[in-house]
Image (tube, grey):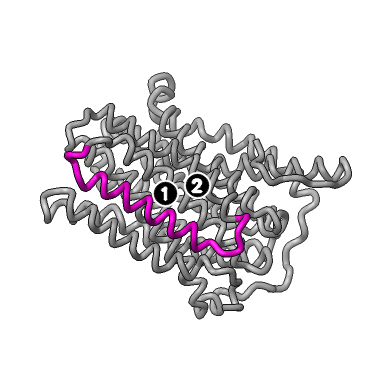
Amino acid sequence: MVPAGFSWTMSIDDGSRRWLLVLGIALVALNLRPALASVGPLVADIRDATGLSNPALGLLTTLPLLAFGFLSAFTSVLSRRVGMERALAIGVVLIAGGTALRAAPSVVALYAGTIVLGVGVALGNVLLPALSKRHFPSRSGGITSLYSSMMGLGATAAAGLSVPIAAELGWRGALGIWVVPAVIALVAWAPQLRSAPAGGVPRRGPGLRRLGRSPLAWQIALFMGLQSLTFYVVLAWLPDLLQSRGLTEAAAGGLLALSQATGVVGTAVVPIWAGRLRDQRRIVWTLTVLEAVGWAGLLLPGVGLEGLWVGLLGFILGGTFGLALTLLVLRSSDAESAGELSGMSQSVGYLVAAVGPPIFGWLFDVSGGWTIPLWFLLLVLAGKLAAGLPAGRAVEIGAG
């Protein structure tokens, strides 16, 4: 379903092409998280079958994040050479190929496929905001709501279905089956390749060097990085925290799934809200206050109501992610600028995110409890507020 806010008046042919574009974007976005979210539920099966250590298994999640971090900034180079639509198609091909490779009976193939699909997901992460700016410049909130929600749905489906699929097909089959939606997305995206502009266009965006000198670009990048850090900490550590409060493993896993589900709602609602405003600072304040309430609830174990706090935090983290993606579009003057800003922000963001879970775990080890690690997340929240308020001003890169 396309979010509210789309009301195109054009010929039937143009309208059909636009709907095919929306469908293609939605299906591509659906494929940007299953390869990541399907690993966690299958870790025990993978360990038993391969004998891999826990640090080696951790690489199956860390390698894609490192690929995002190191390659996102260079996606604009490929998109200028071959065009955005073709570059995105290459990304989907890499996701499909890497996913299929992980199903091969080889540990080497497992890691090689993880790297390949990580590159493909990095291309998709960066190019969707740029395509949104090109094709929907006045409806960026609605289209960002659509594709960020589809990303959340993909992650939720993979997290929830991997174990039942593994019971029928084995863990390799449960990892490899996600090639099917990738192939479907590639077929749905094919019509865009026929009308895509050719590559080799001259640079019109600000360029990475100029972006690196822009305070606004760094504010957006840090906002994205700190929200990603918090998200991956929750993904890695929330079940352990909840079990220490007396919840069973199944109940803790259920609350993690709840956080992902409410996160999908956040990614659907907040971008539409942000897209209707020129200045997003009010949204930054609202999300900050509500997130602080959620962490305060978990800091006070005697209060109970863990489901309320986890559901609230899931909604806020999903909304913050959607807001970060929307800012990439709203703070850019054109599609190429959006692509370059997206590349820089996601490169910085995922490198920052990669250090979050280890720091959180180290703080737990040295303190022997969850209080100091949770105060660390409140410190991160203060950093998000400090970066988000100037990033939310109604200015574009180069104008302030």
Q: Which residues are magenta?
A: 275-303
Horizontal arrangement in the rendering, residue 302 relative to residue 163 (left or right): left
- What residue is at 50 percent from the left and 80 percent from the top? 213
Q: Residue 317: which disc?
A: 1
- What residue is at 87 percent from the left and 42 percent from the top? 13
Q: Tell me the chief SS of the magenta region.
A: helix
Return the residue at label 2: 117
Q: List x then y, in percent, for residue 199.
A: 73, 63
- What residue is at 49 percent from the left and 66 percent from the top? 220
Horizontal arrangement in the rendering, residue 62 relative to residue 334 (left or right): left
- What residue is at 72 percent from the left and 55 percent from the top? 135
Vertical placement of residue 179 versus 282, above or below: above
Report if residue 96 is visible in the image.
no
Q: Quadrant of the C terminus?
A: bottom right
Q: Amino acid at mark 1?
A: Leu
Q: List x then y, in percent, for residue 389.
A: 46, 67
Q: Residue 341: which disc?
A: none
Q: List x then y, in percent, for residue 26.
A: 62, 41
Q: List x then y, in percent, for residue 143.
A: 64, 48
Q: In terms of depth relative to the viewer, which is nearer, 270 or 151?
A: 270
Report if residue 314 is visible in the image.
yes
